[in-house]
Image (cartoon, rainbow, N blue to C red):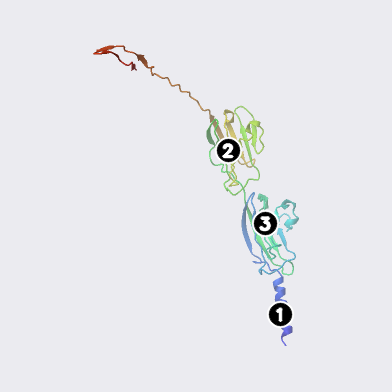
Amino acid sequence: MMFPFCFCLFLSVLHFIDACHVSGHGDRKEVTGYTGGSVLLPCSCTHPQSTVKTFTWKRHYNRPVQWPEVFQDKKYKNRLKLFNKSSPANLSLLISDLRKNDEGLYRCEAPPTTSTYTDIILKIQGCDLDQNKPAAEITGHSGESVVLPCSCTELQAKPEQLTWTFTAPNKNSEEIYPHEQSERDTGRLRLLNEISPGNLSLQISNLTKEDQGEYRCSVSSQQHINITLRVQEELYFQSICLSTNKPAKHREESTTTQHTGGTTRKQPQILH
Protein backbone atom coordinates (compact mmCIF):
# COMPACT_ATOMS: atom_id res chain seq x y z
CA MET A 1 0.00 0.00 0.00
CA MET A 2 1.18 3.50 -0.81
CA PHE A 3 -0.92 5.38 1.76
CA PRO A 4 1.75 5.85 4.47
CA PHE A 5 4.23 7.16 1.91
CA CYS A 6 1.69 9.55 0.37
CA PHE A 7 0.62 10.72 3.80
CA CYS A 8 4.20 11.47 4.80
CA LEU A 9 4.80 13.29 1.53
CA PHE A 10 1.66 15.36 2.12
CA LEU A 11 2.86 16.34 5.60
CA SER A 12 6.26 17.34 4.21
CA VAL A 13 4.68 19.57 1.57
CA LEU A 14 2.31 21.06 4.14
CA HIS A 15 5.23 21.83 6.46
CA PHE A 16 7.16 23.45 3.62
CA ILE A 17 4.24 25.69 2.73
CA ASP A 18 3.52 26.57 6.36
CA ALA A 19 7.09 27.72 7.03
CA CYS A 20 8.08 31.13 5.65
CA HIS A 21 11.20 31.36 3.57
CA VAL A 22 11.96 35.04 2.95
CA SER A 23 11.98 35.89 -0.72
CA GLY A 24 15.41 36.91 -1.99
CA HIS A 25 17.25 35.37 0.95
CA GLY A 26 20.58 37.10 1.48
CA ASP A 27 19.86 39.84 -1.08
CA ARG A 28 20.50 43.53 -0.41
CA LYS A 29 18.19 46.11 -1.98
CA GLU A 30 18.25 49.90 -1.92
CA VAL A 31 15.13 52.01 -1.29
CA THR A 32 14.88 55.82 -1.34
CA GLY A 33 12.54 57.92 0.80
CA TYR A 34 12.02 61.64 1.39
CA THR A 35 11.95 63.51 4.68
CA GLY A 36 8.43 64.04 5.92
CA GLY A 37 7.05 61.29 3.65
CA SER A 38 6.59 57.52 3.90
CA VAL A 39 8.52 54.56 2.50
CA LEU A 40 7.79 50.85 2.15
CA LEU A 41 10.53 48.34 2.90
CA PRO A 42 9.46 45.23 0.93
CA CYS A 43 9.64 41.74 2.41
CA SER A 44 7.55 38.62 1.80
CA CYS A 45 7.51 34.83 2.03
CA THR A 46 8.38 32.96 -1.15
CA HIS A 47 5.06 31.08 -1.00
CA PRO A 48 1.90 33.22 -0.75
CA GLN A 49 0.17 30.57 1.42
CA SER A 50 2.85 30.67 4.08
CA THR A 51 1.93 31.75 7.59
CA VAL A 52 4.31 33.38 10.03
CA LYS A 53 3.77 33.49 13.76
CA THR A 54 6.85 35.57 14.48
CA PHE A 55 9.29 37.57 12.39
CA THR A 56 11.42 40.61 13.09
CA TRP A 57 12.57 43.85 11.52
CA LYS A 58 15.98 44.98 12.75
CA ARG A 59 18.26 47.91 12.10
CA HIS A 60 22.04 47.81 11.99
CA TYR A 61 24.20 50.20 14.01
CA ASN A 62 27.98 50.36 13.75
CA ARG A 63 29.02 51.80 17.10
CA PRO A 64 28.66 49.49 18.83
CA VAL A 65 27.72 46.82 16.32
CA GLN A 66 24.17 45.76 17.08
CA TRP A 67 20.87 44.76 15.44
CA PRO A 68 18.05 46.06 17.69
CA GLU A 69 14.41 45.49 16.73
CA VAL A 70 12.82 48.63 15.30
CA PHE A 71 9.56 48.10 17.20
CA GLN A 72 11.54 48.36 20.43
CA ASP A 73 13.15 51.66 19.39
CA LYS A 74 11.34 54.71 20.86
CA LYS A 75 12.31 56.97 17.97
CA TYR A 76 10.02 54.94 15.67
CA LYS A 77 7.03 55.26 18.00
CA ASN A 78 3.72 55.58 16.08
CA ARG A 79 5.62 55.58 12.76
CA LEU A 80 5.68 51.87 11.85
CA LYS A 81 3.04 49.68 10.20
CA LEU A 82 2.88 45.99 9.15
CA PHE A 83 0.54 44.28 6.69
CA ASN A 84 0.73 40.61 7.73
CA LYS A 85 -2.66 40.63 9.47
CA SER A 86 -4.55 41.07 6.20
CA SER A 87 -1.93 39.23 4.13
CA PRO A 88 0.06 36.73 6.26
CA ALA A 89 2.86 36.27 3.72
CA ASN A 90 3.41 40.03 3.37
CA LEU A 91 6.08 41.05 5.88
CA SER A 92 6.72 44.54 4.45
CA LEU A 93 7.34 47.47 6.79
CA LEU A 94 5.96 50.99 6.27
CA ILE A 95 7.85 53.87 7.91
CA SER A 96 6.08 57.24 7.98
CA ASP A 97 7.15 60.78 8.89
CA LEU A 98 10.65 60.01 7.64
CA ARG A 99 13.64 61.73 9.15
CA LYS A 100 17.20 62.04 7.95
CA ASN A 101 18.47 59.78 10.76
CA ASP A 102 16.18 56.94 9.58
CA GLU A 103 18.76 56.30 6.88
CA GLY A 104 20.58 53.00 7.30
CA LEU A 105 20.57 49.21 6.91
CA TYR A 106 17.41 47.25 7.79
CA ARG A 107 16.86 43.47 7.94
CA CYS A 108 13.65 41.45 7.59
CA GLU A 109 14.21 38.11 9.31
CA ALA A 110 12.00 35.01 9.34
CA PRO A 111 11.74 32.60 12.32
CA PRO A 112 14.81 30.54 13.30
CA THR A 113 13.19 27.47 11.73
CA THR A 114 14.18 28.80 8.29
CA SER A 115 16.88 31.36 9.19
CA THR A 116 16.19 33.34 6.03
CA TYR A 117 16.42 37.12 5.73
CA THR A 118 16.71 40.03 3.31
CA ASP A 119 18.55 43.32 3.81
CA ILE A 120 17.42 46.77 2.66
CA ILE A 121 19.51 49.92 2.56
CA LEU A 122 17.28 52.95 3.16
CA LYS A 123 18.46 56.25 1.67
CA ILE A 124 16.77 59.48 2.80
CA GLN A 125 16.65 62.56 0.59
CA GLY A 126 16.35 65.66 2.77
CA CYS A 127 15.52 69.27 2.00
CA ASP A 128 18.48 71.24 0.67
CA LEU A 129 18.14 74.82 -0.50
CA ASP A 130 19.81 76.04 -3.66
CA GLN A 131 22.07 78.62 -2.08
CA ASN A 132 24.02 79.30 -5.25
CA LYS A 133 21.31 81.59 -6.55
CA PRO A 134 21.81 85.34 -5.94
CA ALA A 135 19.60 87.02 -3.35
CA ALA A 136 16.20 87.70 -4.88
CA GLU A 137 14.57 91.13 -5.10
CA ILE A 138 10.78 91.18 -5.33
CA THR A 139 8.56 94.19 -5.98
CA GLY A 140 4.95 94.26 -4.85
CA HIS A 141 2.18 96.83 -4.80
CA SER A 142 0.20 97.94 -1.79
CA GLY A 143 -3.16 96.23 -1.48
CA GLU A 144 -2.09 93.31 -3.67
CA SER A 145 -0.41 89.91 -3.02
CA VAL A 146 3.17 88.75 -3.55
CA VAL A 147 4.95 85.37 -3.42
CA LEU A 148 8.42 85.09 -1.87
CA PRO A 149 10.09 82.08 -3.60
CA CYS A 150 11.85 79.34 -1.62
CA SER A 151 12.03 75.59 -2.29
CA CYS A 152 13.99 72.40 -1.62
CA THR A 153 16.08 71.02 -4.46
CA GLU A 154 13.92 67.86 -4.07
CA LEU A 155 10.31 69.00 -4.17
CA GLN A 156 9.16 65.69 -2.60
CA ALA A 157 11.27 66.34 0.49
CA LYS A 158 9.72 68.13 3.46
CA PRO A 159 12.13 70.03 5.73
CA GLU A 160 12.33 68.80 9.30
CA GLN A 161 12.15 72.45 10.33
CA LEU A 162 11.23 75.67 8.54
CA THR A 163 11.16 79.32 9.59
CA TRP A 164 10.47 82.58 7.79
CA THR A 165 11.81 85.74 9.44
CA PHE A 166 11.32 89.41 8.58
CA THR A 167 13.59 92.36 9.25
CA ALA A 168 12.16 95.83 8.71
CA PRO A 169 14.54 98.73 8.03
CA ASN A 170 16.37 99.73 11.24
CA LYS A 171 14.53 97.11 13.29
CA ASN A 172 15.25 93.71 14.81
CA SER A 173 14.40 90.46 13.04
CA GLU A 174 11.10 88.75 13.93
CA GLU A 175 9.69 85.31 13.11
CA ILE A 176 6.59 85.40 10.90
CA TYR A 177 6.25 81.66 10.14
CA PRO A 178 5.30 79.26 11.60
CA HIS A 179 4.71 81.51 14.63
CA GLU A 180 3.33 84.94 13.78
CA GLN A 181 4.52 87.49 16.30
CA SER A 182 2.65 90.49 14.95
CA GLU A 183 -1.11 90.96 14.78
CA ARG A 184 -0.77 92.69 11.44
CA ASP A 185 0.39 89.38 9.90
CA THR A 186 -2.63 87.39 11.08
CA GLY A 187 -4.53 85.91 8.14
CA ARG A 188 -2.20 87.42 5.53
CA LEU A 189 0.48 84.71 5.31
CA ARG A 190 0.15 81.34 3.53
CA LEU A 191 2.71 78.64 2.75
CA LEU A 192 2.27 77.24 -0.78
CA ASN A 193 3.19 73.61 -0.01
CA GLU A 194 -0.21 71.96 -0.57
CA ILE A 195 0.94 70.07 -3.70
CA SER A 196 4.72 69.82 -3.25
CA PRO A 197 6.06 69.44 0.33
CA GLY A 198 9.34 70.99 -0.82
CA ASN A 199 7.70 74.21 -2.00
CA LEU A 200 8.40 76.58 0.88
CA SER A 201 7.30 79.78 -0.89
CA LEU A 202 5.42 82.30 1.25
CA GLN A 203 2.46 84.33 0.01
CA ILE A 204 1.73 87.70 1.62
CA SER A 205 -1.63 89.26 0.83
CA ASN A 206 -2.96 92.80 1.26
CA LEU A 207 0.52 94.35 1.12
CA THR A 208 1.32 97.54 2.98
CA LYS A 209 4.39 99.75 3.06
CA GLU A 210 5.27 98.20 6.43
CA ASP A 211 5.90 94.83 4.69
CA GLN A 212 8.96 96.25 2.93
CA GLY A 213 12.26 94.82 4.15
CA GLU A 214 14.44 91.69 4.27
CA TYR A 215 12.98 88.17 4.47
CA ARG A 216 14.83 84.91 5.22
CA CYS A 217 13.71 81.32 4.50
CA SER A 218 15.63 78.87 6.74
CA VAL A 219 15.59 75.06 6.97
CA SER A 220 18.59 74.85 9.32
CA SER A 221 21.17 77.10 10.92
CA GLN A 222 23.43 76.53 7.89
CA GLN A 223 20.88 76.67 5.07
CA HIS A 224 18.86 79.79 4.27
CA ILE A 225 18.08 82.19 1.44
CA ASN A 226 17.44 85.95 1.64
CA ILE A 227 14.82 87.94 -0.24
CA THR A 228 14.38 91.71 -0.42
CA LEU A 229 10.80 92.94 -0.77
CA ARG A 230 9.99 96.44 -1.98
CA VAL A 231 6.43 97.70 -1.79
CA GLN A 232 5.22 100.45 -4.10
CA GLU A 233 2.21 102.47 -3.11
CA GLU A 234 -0.51 102.95 -5.69
CA LEU A 235 -1.15 106.52 -6.82
CA TYR A 236 -4.74 107.49 -7.37
CA PHE A 237 -5.67 110.28 -9.79
CA GLN A 238 -9.09 111.95 -9.79
CA SER A 239 -10.09 113.32 -13.14
CA ILE A 240 -12.47 116.22 -13.32
CA CYS A 241 -14.40 116.77 -16.52
CA LEU A 242 -15.42 120.35 -17.26
CA SER A 243 -18.34 120.86 -19.58
CA THR A 244 -17.93 123.60 -22.19
CA ASN A 245 -21.41 123.28 -23.56
CA LYS A 246 -23.30 126.55 -23.43
CA PRO A 247 -26.95 126.50 -22.45
CA ALA A 248 -29.38 126.97 -25.23
CA LYS A 249 -30.74 130.42 -25.60
CA HIS A 250 -34.26 131.08 -26.64
CA ARG A 251 -34.92 134.01 -28.83
CA GLU A 252 -38.29 134.79 -29.93
CA GLU A 253 -38.60 136.66 -33.09
CA SER A 254 -41.82 138.53 -33.38
CA THR A 255 -42.32 139.51 -36.90
CA THR A 256 -45.51 140.20 -38.64
CA THR A 257 -46.30 139.33 -42.13
CA GLN A 258 -49.00 141.05 -43.96
CA HIS A 259 -51.37 138.74 -45.64
CA THR A 260 -54.58 139.42 -47.20
CA GLY A 261 -57.15 138.73 -44.63
CA GLY A 262 -55.07 139.07 -41.44
CA THR A 263 -51.77 139.11 -39.60
CA THR A 264 -49.61 135.93 -38.96
CA ARG A 265 -46.90 135.65 -36.14
CA LYS A 266 -43.85 133.39 -36.69
CA GLN A 267 -42.97 130.57 -34.13
CA PRO A 268 -40.07 131.23 -31.72
CA GLN A 269 -36.62 129.92 -32.87
CA ILE A 270 -34.09 128.16 -30.63
CA LEU A 271 -30.53 129.34 -31.18
CA HIS A 272 -27.48 127.41 -29.93
The residue furthest front is 261
The nearer-to-camera label among 1 and 2 is: 2
Decide which of 1, 34 is in the foreground and name it: 1
Residue 86 location (% of width, % of height): 69, 62
Mark 2 closeness class: few <14, some 14–19, many ≥20 residues within 10 Å: some
Residue for badge 3: 94
Task: Point out the tag, 1 or 2, that comes first from the N-terminus.
Answer: 1
Q: Mark 1 falls on what kind of element?
A: helix
Residue 272 figure quarter: top left
Decide which of 239, 120 is in the foreground and name it: 239
Q: Mark 3 falls on what kind of element?
A: strand
Residue 175 location (% of width, % of height): 65, 35
Residue at image point 57% right, 28% down:
209
Residue at image point 71% right, 82% down:
6
Residue 139 location (% of width, % of height): 52, 33
Label 2 near label 3: C-beta < 8 Å?
Answer: no
Residue for badge 2: 203
- Amino acid type at circle 1 is Leu
Give the quarter of the figure containing the N terminus: bottom right
Residue for badge 1: 9
Label 2 near label 1: C-beta < 8 Å?
Answer: no
